[in-house]
Image: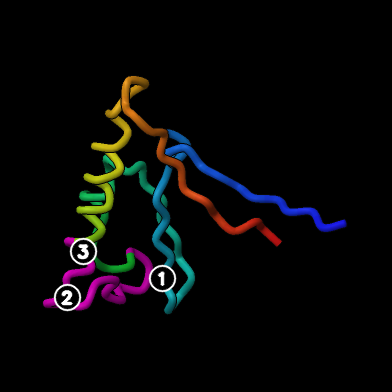
Amino acid sequence: MTSQHRIFLDLQDILMIRLTCRQCGTAISAAPQEVKIIDERCPNCDTPWFVTGSTDRKQLGQLVATLAALRQRGEQAPCHIQLEVEKPA
């Protein structure tokens, strides 16, 4: 017998977005609506988190805006949107 466990998140379940510095391991979590105020450099070691000229920072902002818009759909929306995530080890 095979058993599968799948984990689905409602968009309202996303409480924080976490950024972790690959250089020193410092992590910052922010509510999606607060991501725009996160510094572009690690507050501990000053390593840039976003490459100058790249679209990474802009895309993070777009992700947050998209999440906010989809959260506003409400119960009258024709479908319910969830994200499937990997089961923790």
Give the amino acid at mark 1. Answer: Cys
Q: Which callout, 1 or 3, points to the residue nearer the camera?
A: 3
Left/right placement of residue 87 relative to residue 34 reads: right
In the rendered image, the quadrant that contains the N terminus is: bottom right
The reply to whether callout 2 and callout 3 are in contact (CB within 8 Å) is yes
Q: Using the image, determine if residue 17 lies above or below residue 43.
A: above
| Residue under the image location 36 percent in, 42 percent down | 31
In this figure, which residue is indicated by the disc labeled 1?
Answer: 21
Mark 1 and 2 residues: CB-CB less than 8 Å, in contact? Answer: no
Q: In which quarter of the image is residue 54?
A: bottom left
Residue bearing mark 2: 54
Horizontal side, residue 53 vs residue 85: left or right = left
Q: What stretch is highlighted in magenta?
A: 43-58
Residue at the top extreme, as displayed: 76
Disc number for residue 57:
3
- Choose mark 1 or mark 2, whichever is in front: 2
Farthest residue toward the right? 1
Asked if 5 appears above or below 19 in the picture, the reply is: above
Q: x and y percent of residue 14 in the render?
A: 44, 41
Q: What element carries label 1?
A: loop
Give coordinates of residue 4: x percent, y percent: 73, 54
Disc 2 element: loop
For disc 3, the neighbor class at 10 Å (few under 14, some 14 to 19, many from 20) is some
Residue at the image position 43 percent from the left and 65 percent from the top? 20
